[in-house]
Image: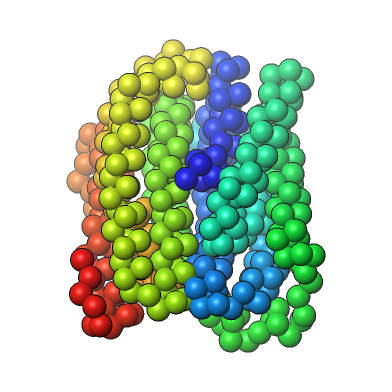
Amino acid sequence: MLANLTTPLIGIVSTTAIGRLGEPALLGGAAMASVIFDCMFWLFAFLRLSTVAFTAQSLGSGDIEELPALFARGLVLAALIGSALIALQVPLAALLLDAMGGSRDVTEAARIYFSVRIWSSPLALGNYVVLGWLVGQARARLALLVQIVINLVNMATTALLVLEFKFGIAGAAVAAVIAEGSGLLLGILIARRLLRGRLAVPRKKLFDRTKLTRMFAVNRDIMLRTAALITTFLFFTAQGARAGDVTLAANSVLNNFLLMSAFFLDGLANAAEQLCGQSFGARDKEGFSTATRLVVFWGFVFAVIVMAVFALFGPQLIDFMTASQDVRSAARDFLIFVIASPLLAVFAFAFDGVYIGATWARDMRNLMLVSLLIFFTAWLGLRGYGNAGLWGALLAFYAARGGLEALRYPELLKATFGKTRRVG
């Protein structure tokens, strides 16, 4: 949980440092670009998710010789995807920034940030693999160590380049590149130690046809599911941008709250991925269902805690993230939606972890597409309420995701493990 909680800090630190400069256009640009990178990298979250599942399943089945190959396959794929993003950076920037619909000043600031941070792509995606591989082995402390190093380096270099050397928004992007590179280097060194120097994998094993076919099938479905999820948040951000720079900046500040909440709850989802994945590999139905119940229960406990933190300290956190009085005022107006979000998101995060651990990727993809349709339907019905209606649609999306997965779970459990034991 702590390892995941640190994940959104690169965007948060960048937004906060630029926000301290007191210029809404720069803050909006940093926030817009950060959302773009969060979403763009998120599209390839299968690098982490499938690595967790396959690693945990290998442990459960006793196939520990597969661990080096899983790590190597993930890094090769991360390098290929990251290099492609760098090669396509010009059309990507034009497409994504134009689609966001920000003002001229906001878009120009975002373009500067994008042109620098895009070079972190292979590094950031490689860190997805490292995190998934470590979590899949239940080595969460090592995953936390890597994330802490990434964010300490990011905070230090951002403060130095933005606040001390006055490099502005480009300085925040350079800091992100340096931080991701530091994390990946540490992750590879940790993997080398855990594998006792056996990082090299024979070509035949690395490109095993059966393993690759399964990996690509699961990754495809997770990617499509993630694309639907990204569509929701990009649409949300674009609608905020069309409402003006102040609304965009306010929503971006509040989006950091959502990210903190999401990655907090996603820590439990990671536990489900590992525990359910290992139980799946061992064909242990009781262990699988017990892990599911525990994750859902503790999800509700931590959701209440997060809600209390947002309710008690939300205004102070808003003031810390931005120096603009207009943005502070607008963010406070919609804080209630952020406070309500964790409780509605519990099932969504918990069952995402369960579905990923069991590699029920096709069903997860289909249910996400239905949830996306529910989001747009809710937005159409609530758009007359402006930004409040937009937030309402987002909460409806959270509720739909978790509710649909919870309803589908019993049937998938029966199909996977049979009727040997009564669960529940």
Find residue 335 and report its image quarter.
top left
Position of 44 with respect to 246 (left or right) is: right
Q: Position of residue 202 (x, y in %)?
A: 77, 80
Q: Residue at x 62, y 74 (%)?
A: 64
Q: Is residue 88 visible?
A: no
Q: Quadrant of residue 87?
A: bottom right
Q: Is residue 130 left or right of residue 259?
A: right
Q: Quadrant of residue 66?
A: bottom right
- Asked whether 275 or 257 is in front, the reply is 275
Q: Is residue 405 above or below residue 94?
A: below
Instruction: Count numbered badges in the picture.
Output: 0
Viewer-proximal residue among 159 and 232: 159
Q: Residue at x 47, y 62 (%)?
A: 274
Depth check: give the residue in front, 85 or 69: 69
Q: Is residue 207 above or below residue 302?
A: below
Where residue 10 sits: x, y (%)? 60, 37
If the image is split into quadrants, where does the C terminus sit? bottom left
Colouring rule applied to residues: rainbow
Q: For the point 76% across and 81% down, which residue is it?
A: 203
Residue 227 shows in the view: yes
In x, y percent, where is residue 149? Answer: 67, 39
Task: Identify the residue at horizontal 58%, vertical 86% (top origin).
Answer: 210
How far across and down, in percent of the image, does residue 114 sit?
65, 42
